[in-house]
């Protein structure tokens, strides 16, 4: 598989006040833009140490440069759909920190908005590979590290989406991938019990990012109309993640929904 070079690109905002007593080592995928960037900033502001992972060096550099202290952020370029790249990534985590406390599987693609008969196999595969297989590959590697580190255990948070429960029109690949992520979360939560690994999912509705830019202007509804939908600032989602990882690993939040209050989620269909 071809793609960007894998490896370290930049470090940013190292802690200057010493390590925060409750600081954790966190890996965030899809960290260069949108929710990933907001999550990275919120985590470092809370004193955590983040490996910000993505495919585009320029956006990662910007995200890391914008991450405040007292925590720290470091960028690592990789493609989470590439098994060898993921192996290298988690080798770097173990070499750098010796452990991983939290994995946030945030990398995702929406794909083309098309009727099912117009969706190409290539576009279908790109969405499935990124949203589902990428989450699996990172979770698999995280389980291995979290089981052998001392003390053992940790937390994994998958980015599910409202579409893990109900679809948008003309979004077959994205909907299928997010429904599958929900199954992945359940299976991992069950398997993680014996190893003090808490696995949960955050389902986000209309956070204002590049991915949802068109929704505020007008989104296709199930009745065929096109109507604007409200959005929320991504920082509110990031704040929920910061609160979740502050919990001890014996406490799990299997599913958490954060959404714009006025979005038509409850009325889809």
Image (cartoon, rainbow, N blue to C red):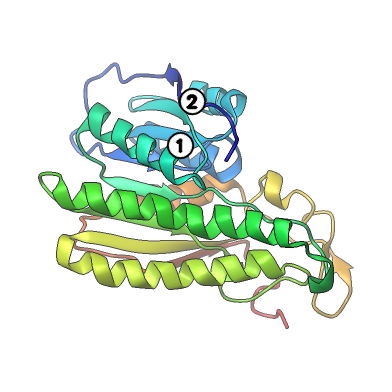
Residue 251: x %, y % from top left: 23, 63
Q: How far apart in space, not on screen, are marks 1 and 2 (Cα)?
A: 8 Å
Q: Is residue 52 above or below residue 146?
A: above
Q: Secondary structure at mark 1?
A: helix
Q: Secondary structure at mark 2?
A: helix
Is 100 situated left or right of 225 in this image?
left
Q: Which residue is mark 2?
A: 64
Label 1 environment density (alpha carbons within 10 Å; few <14, some 14–19, many ≥20): many
Residue 95: x %, y % from top left: 24, 29
Is 73 situated left or right of 193 in this image?
right
State which quadrant residue 140 falls in: bottom left
Q: Is residue 27 above or below residue 237?
A: above
- Residue nearest the viewer, comparing 5 with 238: 5
Label 2 environment density (alpha carbons within 10 Å; few <14, some 14–19, many ≥20): many
Q: Which residue is mark 1?
A: 40
Residue situated furthest front in the rendering:
1
Is 117 situated left or right of 167 in this image?
right
The answer to the question of whether label 1 and label 2 lie on touching residues, with beta carbons closer than 8 A, is yes
Q: Is residue 95 visible?
A: yes
| Residue under the point 27% across and 61% down | 198
Residue 183: x %, y % from top left: 44, 73
Nearest to N terminus: mark 1 or mark 2: 1
Q: Is residue 99 above or below residue 177?
A: above
- Residue nearest the viewer, comparing 217 with 1: 1
- Residue nearest the viewer, comparing 105 with 95: 95
Q: Is residue 33 above or below residue 207?
A: above
């Amino acid at each position: 598989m071809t793609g960007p070079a894998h490896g370290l690109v930049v470090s940013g905002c190292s802690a200057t006040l010493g390590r925060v007593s409750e600081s954790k080592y966190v890996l965030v995928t899809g960290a260069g833009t949108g929710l990933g960037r907001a999550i990275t900033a919120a985590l470092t502001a809370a004193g955590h140490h983040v490996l910000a992972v993505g495919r585009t060096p320029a956006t990662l550099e910007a995200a890391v440069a914008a991450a405040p202290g007292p925590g720290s952020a470091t960028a690592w370029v990789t493609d989470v759909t590439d098994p060898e790249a993921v192996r290298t990534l988690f080798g770097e985590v173990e070499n750098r920190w010796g452990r991983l406390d939290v994995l946030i599987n945030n990398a995702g693609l929406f794909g083309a908005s098309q009727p099912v008969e117009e969706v190409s196999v290539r576009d279908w595969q790109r969405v499935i590979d990124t949203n589902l297989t990428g989450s699996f590959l990172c979770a698999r590697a995280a389980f291995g590290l979290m089981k052998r580190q001392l003390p053992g255990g940790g937390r994994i948070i998958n980015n599910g989406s409202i579409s893990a429960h109900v679809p948008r029109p003309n979004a077959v690949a994205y909907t299928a991938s997010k429904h599958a992520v929900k199954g992945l979360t359940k299976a991992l939560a069950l398997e993680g019990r014996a190893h003090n690994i808490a696995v949960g999912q955050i389902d986000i509705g209309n956070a204002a990012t590049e991915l949802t830019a068109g929704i505020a202007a007008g989104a296709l509804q199930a009745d065929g109309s096109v109507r604007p939908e409200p959005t929320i600032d991504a920082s509110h989602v990031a704040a929920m993640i910061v609160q979740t990882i502050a919990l001890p690993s014996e406490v799990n939040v299997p599913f958490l929904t954060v959404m714009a209050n006025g979005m038509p989620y409850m009325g889809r269909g």
